[in-house]
Amino acid sequence: MSARPFEGVRILDFTQVLAGPFASYQLALLGAEVVKVERREGEDMRRTPLSREWAERGMASAWQAVNGNKRSLTLDLQKPEAREILLRLAAEADVVMENFRPGVMDRLGLGYEALSKVNPRLIFCSVSAFGQTGPDRLEAGYDGRIQAMSGIMAMTGHPGGDPLRAGFAVCDQLSGMTAAFAVASALFQRTHTGQGQRLDVSMLESTLAFLGGQVADWTVAGHQQRPWGNQAVSRKATANLFRARDGHLLLAVNTDKQYESLMRAIGRADALEEPRLADWFLRLENAALLREVIEGALAAGDAAEWEERLNAAGAPCARIWRVDEVIEHRQIRARDALQEVETPWGRLRFATTGFRMAHGGARLDRPAPALGADTEAVLAAAGYDAARIAAFREAGVI
């Protein structure tokens, strides 16, 4: 097997919950050696209440989803011996990642200034709600708060309805991917400068970066985004949700060629001659008429039937798939998009990265670790003998 991009890179990972762990997970999939530092009772996300069975194991499914390929080291960070251990590990690390509130790592004696003294080449990545500077830097941030503040909820939902948050932790995930990209960038930069550095990732700013088009709509054109229901940002009237006989179909028809294909495929070629639907401006102005034409035709068949038929005709669309359905989709199966890994509870499947490499790509080698599963191995590799490790355990350090 070819070497993966980050093989040989050592990451000391203090992150917890989602944004930070998702970032280090991406790097672990690509070969980085990630040691996850947890308090002795483990982080709260190990016990999320979706499933009592998995929560009691300390292996909640969402936690497993972002902690594969990592090793678990448990420490009581309040004890001075723990700081001694971590200084030794940081001296040999390439990256430290954390997502505490600003100042927490400094108070523990493990901030960038302290660790860079023992390792000037260290890359220290902090993920927080609002960044390490500014008037709100100490405030707590969760995905929901950032969705509400960033503009996402103000533009999500139906006109006249209540604001809606996305159906997953989109701001956590965007921030995690931003952090992974920041670490990759700093590692590459270090190859020709030899210098480590501090990385400051703000969840709010990460989200705004992904909303760049909507930001520019306001800063450039003075256009304030508002909820458009299920209509695409293209504002094409045929890029919207329509009802079929047994459910819904999301049409993504955005070009004149696709529009013509749609009308012919649903048996309404006559609508191509309708002057009220002659161009995209008129189609939006007469969206109610267009919906009547389309849904009148779609009522004759089920959404799955229309999905096959319209896509084949060149009119992009999709029925509404559930997660349990899409992971069995022929395309996902053909590309092995989910990877299986052997666990104490059988073989389980997880999502990994969204890209393929010709060689040295992402690979899920081992499942998320049980709490403290690697503590002794990590300490032994750092040079501690069995007697010292036993003393640490007796003193409640590990």
Image: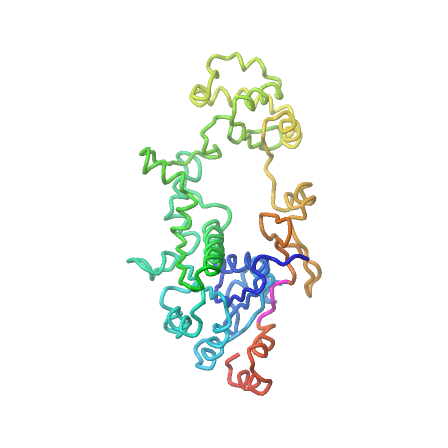
Residue at coordinates 52% horizontally, 74% vertically from top-left? Answer: 40
Image location of residue 381, percent across then percent down: 58, 77
Image location of residue 143, percent across then percent down: 44, 53
Q: Is residue 379 part of the magenta span, yes or no?
A: no
Residue at coordinates 44% horizontally, 19% vertically from top-left? Answer: 282
For the N terminus, the quadrant is: bottom right
Q: Is residue 275 above or below residue 226?
A: above
Q: Is residue 36 above or below residue 87?
A: above
Residue at coordinates 54% horizontally, 64% vertically from top-left? Answer: 9
| Picture quadrant of residue 322 | top right
Residues in magenta? Answer: 367-371
Numbered-mark total: 0
Image location of residue 214, percent across then percent down: 39, 39
Foreground residue, 331 or 183? 183
Foreground residue, 130 or 96? 96
Foreground residue, 255 or 119? 119
Instruction: Decide whether the magenta segment is chiefly helix, strand or loop.
Output: loop
| Picture quadrant of residue 129 | bottom left
Q: Is residue 370 part of the magenta span, yes or no?
A: yes
